[in-house]
């Protein structure tokens, strides 16, 4: 599945200027390439270096992290 399609749709049809995406594995690579910011959530080994931010399983910290970046 190409996970970049929903992000393209948000940008094109909904006219969002900035899209943040999150993922945990290699299947999220297409989404990482097209999102304006990509956040790894408990990423698989070796993937964290290719994103903007890495968080563990506590998504409650996400608003604070996004407000700082």
Image (spheres, rainbow, N blue to C red):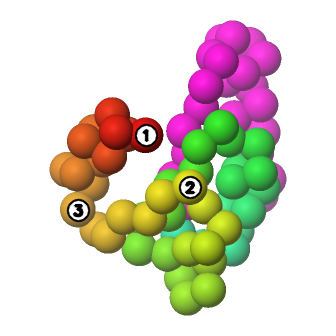
User: CA–CA distance between discs 3 and 2?
Assistant: 17 Å
> In this image, 43 relative to 16: left or right?
left
Tell me the crowding category of disc 3: few under 14, some 14 to 19, or many 20 or more residues within 10 angstroms, Cα based. few
User: Is residue 3 within the magenta segment?
Assistant: yes
Q: Which residue does the image show at 53% across and 69% down from the upper left?
A: 24
* Location of residue 33 with respect to 29 vertically, above or below: above
In this view, the residue in front, 23 or 37, is: 37
User: Is residue 20 within the magenta segment?
Assistant: yes
Which residue matches tag 3?
Answer: 58
* Location of residue 30 with respect to 17 vertically, above or below: below
Q: Quadrant of residue 16?
A: top right
Q: Where does the image place residue 15, in percent across and percent down from the top left?
A: 69, 11
In this view, the residue in front, 14 or 39, is: 39
Q: Which mark is residue 52?
A: 2
Q: Is residue 6 visible?
A: no
Q: Which residue does the image show at 32% across and 70% down from the upper left?
A: 56
> In this image, 50 relative to 22: left or right?
right
Q: Which mark is residue 26?
A: none
* Location of residue 21 with respect to 53 vertically, above or below: above
> In this image, 59 relative to 20: left or right?
left
Q: Secondary structure at mark 1?
A: loop
Q: Are dots 2 and 1 in contact, CB under 8 Å?
A: yes
In this view, the residue in front, 35 or 6, is: 35
Q: Where does the image place residue 60, in percent across and percent down from the top left?
A: 20, 50
Q: Secondary structure at mark 2?
A: loop
Residue range highlighted in magenta:
1-23
Which residue matches tag 1?
Answer: 69
Q: Where does the image place residue 5, in percent across and percent down from the top left?
A: 78, 39
């Amino acid at each position: 599945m190409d996970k970049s399609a929903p992000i393209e749709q948000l940008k094109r049809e909904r006219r969002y200027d900035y899209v943040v995406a999150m993922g945990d594995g290699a299947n999220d690579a297409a989404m990482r390439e097209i999102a304006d910011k990509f956040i790894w959530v408990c990423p698989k080994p070796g993937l964290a270096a290719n994103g903007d931010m890495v968080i563990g399983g506590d998504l409650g910290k996400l608003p604070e992290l996004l407000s700082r970046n």
